[in-house]
Image (cartoon, coloured by chain):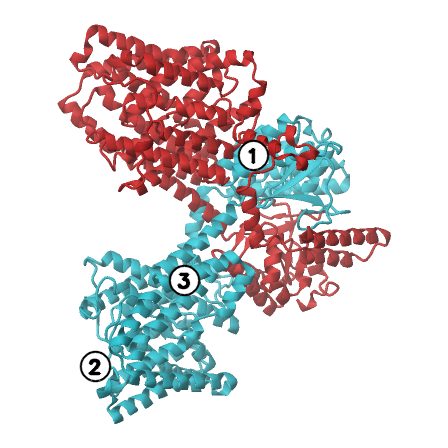
Chain colours: A cyan, B red
Amino acid sequence: MTSLTPVVHHALSIERHNVEQQQSPEPEFHVTNQRANWVLNSSDPPGFSQQIFGLIKKNILPPRNNTPSSSSSSQKEQPPSARLIAVLRSVFPVLSWGRNYKASKFKNDLIAGLTLASLSIPQSIGYAALANLDPQYGLYGSVVPPLIYSVMGTSQELAIGPVAVVSLLISSMISKLVDPMADPVSYRKLVFTVTFFAGSFQALLGLLRLGFLIEFLSHAAIVGFMAGAAIVIGLQQLKSLLGISHFTTKTDVISVLGAVAKSLHTSWYPLNFVLGCSFLIFILITRFIGKRNKKLFWLPAISPVISVILSTLIVYLTRADDHGVKIIKHFKGGLNPSSVNQLEFNGPYVGHAAKIGFICAIIALTEAVAVGRSFASIKGYNLDGNKEMLAMGFMNIAGSMSSCYVATGSFSRTAVNYSAGCESTVSNIVMAITVIISLQLLTKLLYYTPLAILASIILSALPGLIDYNEAYHIWKVDKLDFLACAGAFFGVLFASVEIGLLIAVSISFGRLILNSIKPGIEELGRLPGTDIFCDKAQYPGVVDVSGVRIIRLNSGSFCFANANPIKERITRCVTKENEKEETKKPINGIILDMSSVVSIDSSGILALEEIHTKLYSRNIHLAIANPRWKVIHKLKVGGFIGKIGSHCIFLTVNEAVDACLNPISFGLGNC
Amino acid sequence: MTSLTPVVHHALSIERHNVEQQQSPEPEFHVTNQRANWVLNSSDPPGFSQQIFGLIKKNILPPRNNTPSSSSSSQKEQPPSARLIAVLRSVFPVLSWGRNYKASKFKNDLIAGLTLASLSIPQSIGYAALANLDPQYGLYGSVVPPLIYSVMGTSQELAIGPVAVVSLLISSMISKLVDPMADPVSYRKLVFTVTFFAGSFQALLGLLRLGFLIEFLSHAAIVGFMAGAAIVIGLQQLKSLLGISHFTTKTDVISVLGAVAKSLHTSWYPLNFVLGCSFLIFILITRFIGKRNKKLFWLPAISPVISVILSTLIVYLTRADDHGVKIIKHFKGGLNPSSVNQLEFNGPYVGHAAKIGFICAIIALTEAVAVGRSFASIKGYNLDGNKEMLAMGFMNIAGSMSSCYVATGSFSRTAVNYSAGCESTVSNIVMAITVIISLQLLTKLLYYTPLAILASIILSALPGLIDYNEAYHIWKVDKLDFLACAGAFFGVLFASVEIGLLIAVSISFGRLILNSIKPGIEELGRLPGTDIFCDKAQYPGVVDVSGVRIIRLNSGSFCFANANPIKERITRCVTKENEKEETKKPINGIILDMSSVVSIDSSGILALEEIHTKLYSRNIHLAIANPRWKVIHKLKVGGFIGKIGSHCIFLTVNEAVDACLNPISFGLGNC
């Protein structure tokens, strides 16, 4: 509280000044000087240690619960038990909404959950194949993670389970370390270890409230990455769709097309292709119908399960598997087995596993949070990013111990869940129970399911990942943003998923750096008849103030990377002007509008000093207008104010202009 | 010219509007709306392709000569020969200043040049030893590069030749590839190749006008790097000072001290130490005298050469080399031999050579431009960074073909040159000629010069590289800046020069990124009795406008990395406010002051749209005040203006406040 005292005191002194001013209007320049003093005498902004402490306090410690129900005035007198309940409620949102849960809601959730399960079962099996795992591991991933999420998650719609992009990440990155065909046991162990790491990173990010890390993939990068991943996933399906036995473990377009071309010369089975394509067309038609008639939303949702049943029957009845149609075959039923003892933390690949886990964690979170947020904003509630991360983290840690691989919120299934009218995460519980029942009873029936059908189910989900319109919109709005998008797209397509991500992140940050250090300056002019000063290029109607140049820095940072170029531009702009327009009144004042400079460093202060020296030697005043809190503090600490004198600092451009036009009365003569 | 037409037209329409306004004052809101229209209807800023083209035009093509003598109005009618002369003058500044060069100036330059030579000869020999080269290569470097610089350079004071830090870079990085003891011929070839690359990079940077690249080493990083390098160089001198034969090729403190400790147990010769230390003390005393009495500036300048002469005599007379005093011995005299056929562009190390060349080029330029600028600003003239780079580039390319290694402007010798009263680069010519004469006549006399003396001469030049005061100043101004400084210092000291540089650059840019994406918002309030709106935290005297919150973004970029956190803060700030202060008037308007946002990307626009949607659902108006040219353009192109309606855009915060207080008359009712 003591640190507030000078602030309060200062506020009082300003109030008093205002009262005095109203009582006896003082000469204009006095008021202006007084205002300039406010700039100089404002209290110091929070220091480095205070900032760090504040950051820790805000990020690490849990915030006070701000929900209306608990924000009563008697919060401080809460007994420990009430606090415990508040913490529990914060970690398990089910405790809050569960008490108001009604039978009518459950009816909706039941329908949504069953619809979801009918889509989830075939998709999960397909994604498991994409991740180079046996089919049951996909189904396992639709049991434990959704159950955990349903008690910890804050999204009502998110459908949890294996997703395409993460399956691709898992298979493409882990296959480089261990060959899933040659050594499936080691491969599986590594998958569970990666899942454990991914879950741990997600939980850690949530606990430390470091959710902002997932913002580092820009919107444009995600659009490009998803589109590239969709095409890569689609190409991977050619293996099942053509019934090819020998395929490449690489994921780039050139390797995959090369492998396909090679196989087309030797051995492939057209029956697979015919079967897959027919059912793909069937699924796409049902989707089209579903889009035209909103009441038939369930048709595209259950068409995959219908395809599976029909195609399995066809293969069983016609014995097509003897004619080259690849089928699932082995399919272990029963509940998720424990995989705790399959986690390996001291093998040769533990470092790689951690790295892959981190990438999967970020991509999985990005997808889930993006999907969750978009549906939350439709329904008008808020998604707590940090709680989501915690929920995702715990569900994946639990998943890694129960034979699941990284699960997250799926684009396509969440949309189905929403259309089916889900009311809460109970639909995820319904789905999980349905999947458990299927695992117990139905696995034997899936023996004859053709792989081509799984491929066509995956293929049918891919178009949703490619967002042409958004890519075109990005191109229209920002060419460099589009470059990040295209970089991610082509990187994923022609190199690998990691390189695509790396390119996208590098371009996004490179652009950010370029934008922050661009040494731009703008000249301002007065809007005729007002005290408003605007960019001369933006508003051609503004007029110059005779003898004064007003320059605004066009960059948020005035720092090492742009201090010298900015300095040179400012001095050059004065030199040119004074040489060119000999007939006009020569410039005798330069006003630097610092309002947009958010940060300044020692190089920036040095450059300001040099500008001052150079202008001083030409007998030109330098005035600083409207520096921000941190900037004025740095200028004071850095000794700049001491050098140029406090009479050269102004609150507004207008006051600085007045001072430059009447230098004597403002004491600018010495400046 | 056609692209200017809409601008002119627009300007005219504004002028017309102003005239109308003066004739018949219209209602206030009409004027405000009109102003808001200016924001919306301003012409488009230069597009991406125009920017790129402008950048190329500005950077690649040489600028019009802006010196007063040639900026006559008849410039366009210049004959080709006159243009050629202008270009030649621009490349060879000697053609400009040479015509006014007088005998009186030459007298000063002669004295300065001779003084410079007396310091340069022993230093060059010492630095050659530091670079693991024979002594004559140091002297060669004080012949060709200074001669070329004297006709191309723009600095009057810069003393060109080998310098300590670059010698250290050369030896530490090239020794890793080729052992200079085992294979001196290959080592030398590599040194010349590196020099060629360094020169080419420097010339290229100058030609492409990419001088801003050397700004990427922040001031703080340079201070730390130089101090670290000075200590490393000092430690390297222990070899000569203690007369140790077997030394490490590593440069980090631990390796070097380890090697010294090991040698102290086995074989070292105290006589070297006694000799070196005595003369070091002598040089330091002369420097002290020179500082106290400015007239005796020549005393510290010639004390190294005196030390060399005296110590050589002592060794020669006492035959101390038989008692373990290490001497120079072989010393090839004569002019620079050609080294054109020693450049290797297809060996196994050509990639490394290019990398090392790039690092040396940047460090050499950084040192030269920093030294040159500081002396230019004392004398009050401007240093053209791009011309300097071109001059440095050509002098090093020429140097690489005449047995020189990377040369640049030296801190210590430039100061001597300045104190000795040099008037132009002629002092460099005088020095070069003196060195040529020494190479022809004096090399035999240096046979008995003890290595310990060279070490003490280098040691005496090092304190100038360590700037405690500046480091303390940086600490005071900015803790994160100091972290970059300390990172560079300890990186150089305990790892290697490259790692030190890498740490410094990473910290500098990391800080820049953090500063640009910090998701800060500030609430603004009205300065009582004015139309000025200021940060409430900075100016505690400001007051809230009832029912309106004014929020300014505290970040130059509104982009993927901070769009979501900013969005959340803004919406949270509204929610809290409306819940907390139930007695007060609830908020019905949020004004976003965008004046400090320099760039926005598609994520930023998306976030704005989401803010608008969220506020709209709570029946709160969103108004955007004072967007910059590029930002408003992006908002228009991105479709944001179309969504929220053009009546929500305002030129100033004040106008937006007026509109929010009278929503009906401003058409904000629908917003």
Q: Chain of mark 2?
A: A
Q: Place residue A625 in its image quadrant.
A: top right
Residues marked 3 and 1 touching at CB (< 8 Å): no
| Mark 3 vs mark 1, CA separation in Å | 44 Å
A243 lies above or below B378:
below
Label 3 belongs to which residue? Answer: A490
- The quadrant of the image that shows the C terminus of chain B is bottom right
Mark 1 surroundings within 10 Å by alpha-carbon count, few (fewer than 14), some (14 through 19), many (20 or more): many
Chain bearing tag 1 is A
How crowded pointer 3 is (Cα within 10 Å; few <14, some 14-19, many 20+) is rated as: many
Could you tell me residue A44's position as x and y percent?
Answer: 53, 40
Name the one closer to the observer, B121 or B584: B121
Q: Amino acid at mark 1?
A: Leu
Whether label 3 touches label 2, CB < 8 Å:
no
Q: Residue at x 33, y 63 (%)?
A: A360
Residue hosting label 1: A608
The numbered mark at residue A330 is 2
- Report whether A290 appears left or right of B29: left
Q: Residue furthest top?
A: B317
